[in-house]
């Protein structure tokens, strides 16, 4: 391992060690050749063998892959390759330093992201991955630690590229041929075919789907002692929906992204982007119609309280994910008009709705309403929001009208 203040090729001075991974070490360094001594990232590849054949092939692969990385770096949301070199039979990449916070650190602080933020994250990262795939490159290690929000413009930057991946996963056989032998990736984010050493474009789609689920649930798929996310023993598919408040259509898209067999997954990025756009358009059209109906036909006569106006505004701008979070802040139900049993049912319903179990919540609300419907204003409100979560907009509107 390199030491602090150590200088490579009389130019790059090591500031600190950042991380280790497989056969690589990553460092933060300073470019002493340039006047302002900008920071950069240095990645060091340590070969398993230094025999002449392996070294020769590694050198060829390293140079070829570095040229690919140089081309990828033309994209604004991929770190630029600043240089590459060999010193003492070890290979080094020098990349642009991205000042920002990665998704892994953000999730460590906030635990979960809202559905709205995850949807935007998916669309942003997919656009970058689309460019990568167009250049006939598979990233192979999409995960929260490699997704950085750049401070200067708040854009997503996809990192974790490296010629080291191509070199470290190949060995030289007795005949001088190469073959993939070691999977590159992070446990929990690797698709089955990556584990088998045969990555494909849909492997990146899988890894991004898992990343989105991590962000929605707050559950790290890489942890297995004990596992934070379970697998269905029959289908081997990930069981995650119960841990998230998520629109059913978005959940269906994510489920397809992370199918265990690559043939059942989206095959290209454009397919995912198309379905996400359809979902977004559907939301916008539906909430526009719903809000228009309330505004033109109901609002003037209902004399809605402030909560209703907030609800309508949230709907109008498409923040569907905000609705479950409103449930805990509903006006407190007056226990003067409700029996203790009804109050208990109301609280149970709110808990179910907050957990995204809207159908169960509605059944509990209906039980509560049988006790004293005339004085159950808050239960009708909560029921309306649960129905909205199920995309039953007309029924939701009816509940809003009734609760008046």
Image (spheres, helix red, strand yellow):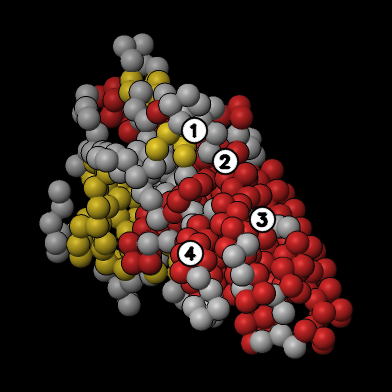
- Along the polypeptide, which appears first: circle 1 or circle 3? 1
- Picture disc at residue 237: 1
- x and y percentages locating residue 109 in the rendered image: 33, 67
Q: Give the mark nearest the N terminus, 4 or 3.
A: 4
* Mark 4 lies on residue: 341
Name the residue nearer the viewer: 381 or 390: 381
N-terminal-most mark, 1 or 2: 1
Q: Which residue is drawn at 38% across and 51% down?
A: 219
Camera-near label (4 vs 3) is: 4
Quote the CA–CA distance across marks 3 and 2.
Answer: 18 Å
Foreground mark, 3 or 2, reads 3
Within-10-Å neighbours for mark 2: few <14, some 14–19, many 20+: many
Closer to us: 114 or 248: 248
Q: Earlier in the sequence, mark 4 or mark 2?
A: 2
Answer whether residue 83 is visible to the viewer in this image.
no
Q: Where residue 17 sits in the image (x, y, percent)?
A: 20, 57
Q: Are marks 4 and 3 in contact (CB under 8 Å)?
A: no
| Circle 1 SS class | loop
- Compared across the picture, whether 85 is left or right of 381 comes to left
Q: What element carries label 2?
A: helix
Tell me which corner region of the image, top left, top right, bottom left or bottom right, holds residue 291: bottom right
Query: How far apart are the two marked residues, 1 and 4, measured between alpha carbons?
Result: 39 Å
The residue pinned by badge 3 equals 390
Q: Against 169, is 389 above or below?
A: below
Image mark for residue 255: 2
> Disc 4 versus disc 3: distance between alpha carbons?
26 Å
Q: Are marks 1 and 2 in contact (CB under 8 Å)?
A: yes
Res 4 quadrant in image: bottom left
Q: Do the residues labelled 1 and 4 touch (CB within 8 Å)?
A: no
């Amino acid at each position: 391992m390199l030491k602090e203040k150590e200088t490579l090729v009389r130019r790059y001075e090591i500031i600190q060690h950042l991380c280790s991974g497989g056969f690589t070490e990553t460092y933060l360094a300073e470019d002493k050749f340039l006047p302002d001594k900008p920071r950069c990232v240095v990645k060091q590849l340590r070969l398993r063998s230094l025999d002449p054949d392996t070294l020769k092939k590694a050198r060829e692969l390293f140079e070829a892959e570095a040229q690919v990385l140089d081309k990828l770096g033309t994209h604004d949301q991929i770190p630029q390759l600043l240089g590459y070199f060999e010193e003492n039979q070890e290979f080094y990449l020098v990349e642009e330093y991205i000042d920002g916070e990665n998704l892994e650190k953000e999730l460590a602080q906030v635990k979960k992201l809202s559905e709205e933020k995850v949807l935007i994250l998916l669309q942003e990262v997919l656009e970058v991955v689309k460019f990568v795939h167009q250049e006939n490159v598979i990233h192979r290690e999409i995960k929260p630690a490699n997704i950085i929000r750049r401070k200067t413009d708040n854009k997503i930057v996809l990192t974790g590229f490296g010629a080291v991946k191509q070199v470290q996963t190949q060995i030289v056989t007795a005949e001088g041929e190469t073959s993939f032998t070691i999977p590159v990736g992070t446990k929990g984010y690797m698709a089955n075919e990556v584990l088998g050493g045969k990555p494909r474009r849909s492997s990146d789609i899988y890894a991004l789907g898992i990343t989105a689920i991590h962000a929605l649930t707050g559950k790290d798929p890489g942890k297995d002692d004990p596992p934070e996310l379970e697998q269905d023993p029959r289908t081997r598919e990930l069981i995650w929906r119960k841990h998230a408040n998520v629109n059913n259509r978005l959940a269906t898209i994510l489920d397809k992204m992370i199918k265990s067999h690559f043939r059942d997954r989206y095959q290209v990025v454009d397919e995912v982007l198309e379905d996400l756009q359809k979902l977004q358009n559907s939301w916008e059209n539906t909430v526009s119609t719903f809000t228009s109906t309330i505004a033109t036909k109901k609002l003037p006569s209902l004399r809605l309280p402030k909560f209703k106006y907030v609800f309508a505004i949230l709907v109008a701008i498409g923040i569907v994910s905000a609705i479950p979070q409103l449930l805990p802040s509903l006006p407190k139900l007056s226990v003067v008009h409700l029996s203790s049993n009804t109050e208990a049912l109301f609280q149970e319903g709110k808990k179910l709705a907050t957990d995204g179990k809207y159908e169960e919540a509605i059944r509990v609300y209906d039980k509560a309403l049988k006790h004293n419907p005339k004085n159950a204003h808050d239960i009708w409100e909560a029921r309306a929001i649960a129905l909205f979560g199920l995309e039953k907009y007309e029924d939701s509107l009816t509940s809003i009208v009734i609760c008046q």
